[in-house]
Amino acid sequence: MITLEAISWTAPGAAFQLQEVSLEIPAHTYAVLMGTTGCGKTTLLELICGLRQLTAGKIWLEGQDVTRWEPWRRGIGYLPQDLALFPETRVGDQIRFPLKVRGQTDGEDLVQELVAELGIGHLLDRFPEALSGGEKQRVALARALAARPHVLLLDEPLSALDETTRRSATELLRTLQERHRLTVLHVTHSSAEAFTLGQLRLRMDQGRVGPA
Amino acid sequence: MRRPFWIFLILITAGYLAFWFLLIAATAGFSTPQAWLQTLVKPEIRYAAGLSVLTCTAAAALALLFAVPIGYLMARRDFPGKTWVDAALDIPIVLPPMVVGICLLIFFQTSLGRRIEAMLPFTYTIAGVVLAQFVVAAAFAIRTMRGTFDHLSPRPEQVALTLGATDFQAFRHVALRTARRGMVAAFCISWARSLGEFGPILVFAGATRMKTEVLPTTVWLELSVGNLDSAVAVSLAMIALAILVLALVRTTGERV
């Protein structure tokens, strides 16, 4: 469950701001947030992740006030628009990264499950530069899910894919959300994505969020 | 189609490079390869060459140790007074080299400096050579590392944080890994810079034969006694080393 309680954020120099944004996404719900380019969707995701600091308001995840928590304590999976795979790291090591930094030694089964589920077993020894757009997205999803998040934040995950890959990726996102019982917040400027995937549809306009 | 503007720019570039080529060619043609070899096998020259390689390597390693965290901080965080800190980091680049030597000499005459000297003597020692080289080389290494981190997207490090990594783990496992080529470039640049350092070493560490003599001081010592052949041979060896280092930096893909 994601709850934003009147959160505000002002960009340095006050060039842009989010004003008292409130929203509630029930647990295990696939929510899609629509909005035009530059309306603050990515900033909102970064605030939820803890990559930016709020100027006011509170963020609750799974019933806990995480407003002052560091990003690594929040239990969030985040896929930025560029996917941000680690450039000099093989796919296998990317997926094991969450286990490595947390010192977990019992996560190999989960890694193997995710690799099989996402069909990326043949990519494990490759570097990101040798992957297609669709493959990169699957690797980024596997990496995010290896951290066992409760919440998955997706920033325009389908925008860089061709039509065929987009269709299979849409199906994959829906399946993963159901199988891993995730609360998903997916931001996009595409109404089609919102109506295909969204159990809850929201719209962001001039720094405020309301129902679509 | 011939476009006069671009031809003009090509001529300027060619003229500048030709000037440098002529300088090096003239130096190389001044004496014979036999004379170079005779100079380079002299014990004092071999000592100076060995000491240069040793101190440059130590100074460059030390410079990298400071340059990586400072470059990362400057590239990734905004803080009050950052512009001033940025300018201060460049001070060793703009200071006249002799002044750096005098500053070092005077610092080690203060009470704090004397206490440090009591534990590890710097003035007129090999450690002093390393310190004098480090002071200037570190500024160049910091510039290089800052440029490297500036060109790397911070996004993978941010995603690493959401995957459970602490700030230090994101730095160590993601940023450092991606910045490896920049680190090689920073090391090479500070090494080459240290090799050419003369003023601060002369003032702070002296030019004692078979003790604190490095290659630039050899050139100066040989010139001062009118031994031009030896000065030319050592200069050519230094030119060769500098070109080698530059080629190495270029293979890393980093711009200096």
Image (cartoon, coloured by chain):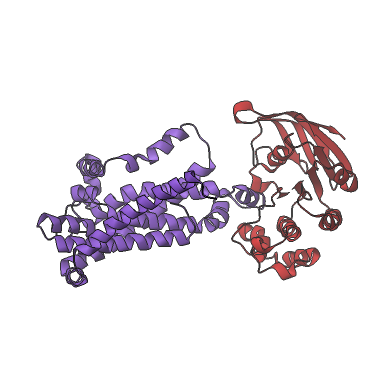
Tell me, yes or no, if residue A62 can be seen here. yes
Q: B32 left or right of B90?
A: left
Nearest the eye: A119 or B49: B49
> Residue at the location (45% across, 34% down)?
B83
What colour do you see for chain B? purple
Q: Is residue A17 above or below residue A138?
A: above
Q: Along the horizontal axis of the image, is B93 left or right of B233?
A: right
Q: Residue B21 placed where, x, y %?
A: 32, 57
**Residue B99 percent location from the top left of the image:** 24, 41
Q: Residue A136, how many percent across, how many down? A: 72, 58
> Foreground residue, B241 or B197?
B241
- Residue at (41% x, 53% y) in the render: B65
Quadrant hosting residue A204:
top right
Task: Looking at this view, name the residue that lies furthest to the left.
Answer: B225
Which quadrant of the figure has residue B212?
A: bottom left
What letter labels the chain drawn in red? A
Q: Is residue B212 visible?
A: no
Give the total of numbered labels. 0
Residue A205 position (above or below residue B69):
above
- The location of residue A156, given as percent across then percent down, is 76, 46
